[in-house]
Amino acid sequence: MRQIILDTETTGLDPNQGHRIIEVAAVEMVNRRLTGNHLHRYVNPDRDIDAGAMQVHGITPEFLQDKPRFADVAQEFVDFIQGAELIIHNAPFDVGFLNMELRLLEMPLLTTWCDGVTDTLAMAKALHPGQRNNLDALCKRYGVDNTARTLHGALLDCELLAAVYLALTRGQESLSIGLEVRGERAAQAAARVRPKPILLQASSEELAAHARLLEAIAGESKGACLWAEGQEGI
């Protein structure tokens, strides 16, 4: 199973107000193992960056002056995520921005390229209702080292989210393994061939001794020995 952990940084909070993507990162995971294959691009948005956004990610317009536009990296991006399940923290935010960028280029929307989107924020809220479930809080809860995260950064956040996602879904993996093991054991038990019972015949001496014992019991019980009554059928 191929999954892509994905994150973006932006000029602001709302693509409907003209805000744009300035950084995109995608980290590949196959069968719950990071492959080391990733995509990471900074993007020139051709507009100012909100002061509040700069405080979060630290990316300045000056840094982005010589970076490509999203149009220059769009095809590379969709090729990288092609056919994979996307794992995103607070997915509606990133999906909204990515769809806006694709729409401006008259390209198909995000779900056309990928095999569905999983929102780890929604997962965390279901598992830990009423608690903080941002990425820093989840790293602390699951013992993921995030000391290098002084500012938000798309690539680092993807790597942290990959570790958090594996922790969030570890119970599902254990359940699957448990079912497989129990199923295998049941199949092995069903396949076993039970040995045929061995029938031992009493010797004439043993039958004579048994008859004498019944006779003695009948005498003591004044003829009320049930075993003696059924002796003819034995």
Image: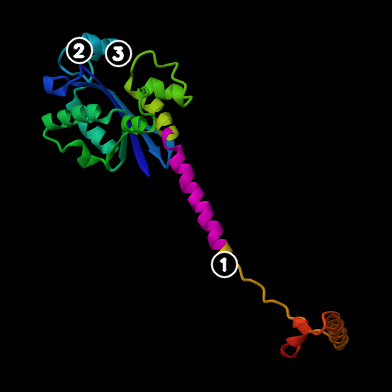
Q: Residues within 10 Å of mark 2 (few under 14, many from 20)?
A: some
Residue topped by disc 2: 49
Residue 198's place in the image compared with 26, above or below, is below
Of the residues shown, which amino acid type is indicated by label 1?
Ala
Residue 58 visible to an observer of this rendering:
no
Assign a secondary structure to mark 2.
Answer: loop
Residue 160 visible to an observer of this rendering:
yes
Whole-number angstrom distance, CA of label 1 to CA of label 3 = 61 Å
Residue at point 11%, 34% (across, down):
106
Assign a secondary structure to mark 1.
Answer: helix
Residue at point 22%, 8% (across, down):
51
Quarter of the image with the C terminus is: bottom right
1 or 3: mark nearer the eye: 1
Q: Is residue 38 left or right of residue 93?
A: right
Q: Is residue 22 left or right of residue 187?
A: left
Residue topped by disc 3: 56
Whole-number angstrom distance, CA of label 2 to CA of label 3 = 11 Å
Of the residues shown, which amino acid type is indicated by label 3?
Val
Where residue 92 sits, quadrant-wise, is top left
Q: Earlier in the sequence, mark 2 or mark 1?
A: 2
Q: Is residue 181 magenta?
A: yes
Where residue 156 sits, quadrant-wise, is top left
Whole-number angstrom distance, CA of label 2 to CA of label 1 = 68 Å
Indicate the colouring scheme: rainbow
Of the residues shown, which amino acid type is indicated by label 2?
Ile
Residue topped by disc 1: 191
